[in-house]
Image (cartoon, rainbow, N blue to C red):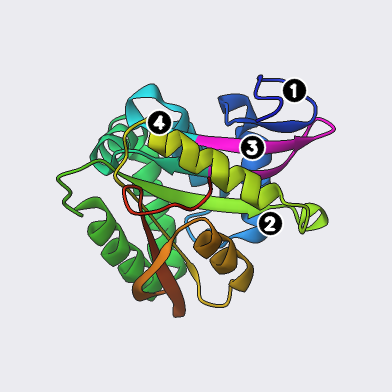
């Protein structure tokens, strides 16, 4: 893995708090964000960087610019309570904005959050929150490098399973995930769009080696 030192001009390295502005810009340019920019800048990504949240991730940097990232968590409960404890007001403001914008979207978000936050597990299970590559830098293998680094991190920290989901229409990420050992685990509706739920069991998978 190359250039994993903070401040590197080109390469793959861990996600740091200083990356938040660029990561949020990239996230909002590619991925849906009904809760708005403020929540991502002041709550979601800062919580990912909080040591108590078990958040982690990697970024791809080219010429000093973040052109790709992947972020996730090791422990849902730790992340949830860190978010509420440190960013409770921002969570309430985001919920209020979502209610004012669209009641149906708010109800769906609450339903998804309840399912995600109360998922019981006897073993540590990771979750990928977001993956994005700048459109100008796609088809260069950057996504595969990000995902492989993420999976290596999960293995080294003893995680038994990793979850994520993606729109069914996102064929490129589905191919990448399957290549790395993920398996189809069902479907769900998010914002009226069908998403594929993906799961990787580390003790059963030989992917991404």
Q: Nearer the viewer, residue 191 or 68?
A: 68
| Residue under numbered circle 1 | 8
Q: Nearer the viewer, residue 48 or 200?
A: 200
The tag earlier along the polypeptide, 4 or 3, is 3
Magenta span: predominant SS is strand
Mark 2 or 1, closer to the camera: 1
Quarter where residue 2 is shown? top right
> Do tag 4 and tag 3 residues touch (Cβ < 8 Å)?
no
Residue span colored magenta? 57-70
In the drawing, does residue 155 fall left or right of residue 145? left
Q: Describe the element under mark 1 as helix, strand or loop.
A: loop
Mark 4 or 3, closer to the camera: 4
| Residue under numbered circle 2 | 29
| Residue under numbered circle 4 | 156
Residue at image coords 39%, 23%: 51
Residue 205 among magenta residues: no
How far separated are the C-alphas under marks 2 and 1?
A: 24 Å
Q: Position of residue 166 (x, y in %)?
A: 49, 66
The tag earlier along the polypeptide, 4 or 2, is 2
Residue at image coords 52%, 55%: 180
How far separated are the C-alphas under marks 4 and 1?
A: 23 Å
**Crowd band around label 2 with a 10 angstrom C-alpha radius: few (<14), some (14–19), many (20+):** few
> Do tag 4 and tag 1 residues touch (Cβ < 8 Å)?
no
Q: Describe the element under mark 4 as helix, strand or loop.
A: helix
Q: Quadrant of the N terminus?
A: top right
Q: Nearer the viewer, residue 52 or 128?
A: 128
| Residue under numbered circle 3 | 59
How far separated are the C-alphas under marks 4 and 3?
A: 19 Å
Q: Nearer the viewer, residue 118 or 174?
A: 174
């Amino acid at each position: 893995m190359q250039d994993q030192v903070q401040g590197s001009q080109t390469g793959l390295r861990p996600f740091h708090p200083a990356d938040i502005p660029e990561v949020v810009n990239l996230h909002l340019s590619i991925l849906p964000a009904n809760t708005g920019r403020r929540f991502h800048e002041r709550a979601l990504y800062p919580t990912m960087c909080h040591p108590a949240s078990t958040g982690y991730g990697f970024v791809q940097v080219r010429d000093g610019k973040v052109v790709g990232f992947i972020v996730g968590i090791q422990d849902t409960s730790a992340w949830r309570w860190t978010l509420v404890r440190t960013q409770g007001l921002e969570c309430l403001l985001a919920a209020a904005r979502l209610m004012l914008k669209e009641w149906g979207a708010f109800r769906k978000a609450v339903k998804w959050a309840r399912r995600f936050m109360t998922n019981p597990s006897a073993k540590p299970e990771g979750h990928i929150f977001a993956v994005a590559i700048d459109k100008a830098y796609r088809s260069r293998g950057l996504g595969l490098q990000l995902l492989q680094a993420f999976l290596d991190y999960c293995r080294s920290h003893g995680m038994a399973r990793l979850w994520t989901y993606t729109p069914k229409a996102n064929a490129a990420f589905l191919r990448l995930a399957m290549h790395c050992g993920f398996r189809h685990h069902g479907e769900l509706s998010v914002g009226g769009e069908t998403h594929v739920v993906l799961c990787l069991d580390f003790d059963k998978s030989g992917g991404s080696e």
